[in-house]
Amino acid sequence: MSPQTAATGGVVVHLPEADPQRQAAVLRNTANLIRALGPDTEVEVVTHGPGVELCTGETGLAETVARLRGQGATVCACANTLTARKLSEDDLLPGVAVVDSGVAHLVRRQREGWSYLRP
């Protein structure tokens, strides 16, 4: 398989950290991934624990999240984390999806044949 060949499965990117520099790096890696694999590759960034701050805009990366979504990526927040932090879907950036459990979603995707990435 050549580096330019589009992947046939999706890629799930794991982001549990709240550090804005770390989050920015993960989002850059994800954007680079989409460019390299092609826009037809499904990509999800799954946040949980402190990483959910990306989805609320607390780390100042709302524009970066919007650009990444514009490239076709889905950004997900863990419902368990939202409950623990007393947050609702109304507290999330526009277009952020909610999954029942961030870690369970990661496992489900891997069982479905998705590639797992923790940059």
Image (cartoon, helix red, strand yellow):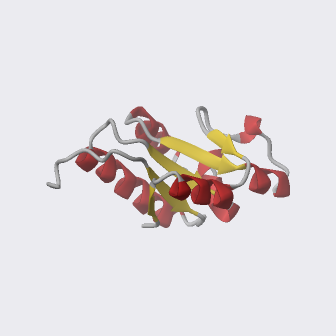
The residue under the point 38% across, 53% down is 30
The residue under the point 60% across, 46% down is 76
| Residue 119 at x, y percent in the picture | 42, 67
Q: Nearer the viewer, residue 103 or 79?
A: 103
The residue under the point 52% across, 58% down is 110
Say whether residue 57 is visible: no
| Residue 12 at x, y percent in the picture | 48, 54
Q: Quadrant of residue 108?
A: bottom right
| Circle count | 0
Q: Is residue 107 left or right of residue 2?
A: right
Q: Nearer the viewer, residue 72 or 61?
A: 72
Q: Quadrant of residue 101?
A: bottom right
Q: Nearer the viewer, residue 83 or 6?
A: 6
Q: Is residue 100 left or right of residue 115?
A: right
| Residue 107 at x, y percent in the picture | 60, 60
The residue under the point 79% across, 41% down is 88
Q: Nearer the viewer, residue 75 or 2?
A: 2
Q: Is residue 105 left or right of residue 33?
A: right
In the rendered image of this protein, does residue 99 appear above or below residue 48? Answer: above
In the rendered image of this protein, does residue 45 appear above or below residue 117? Answer: above
Say whether residue 102 is visible: yes
| Residue 31 at x, y percent in the picture | 35, 48
Which of the image's four quarters has the N terminus? bottom left
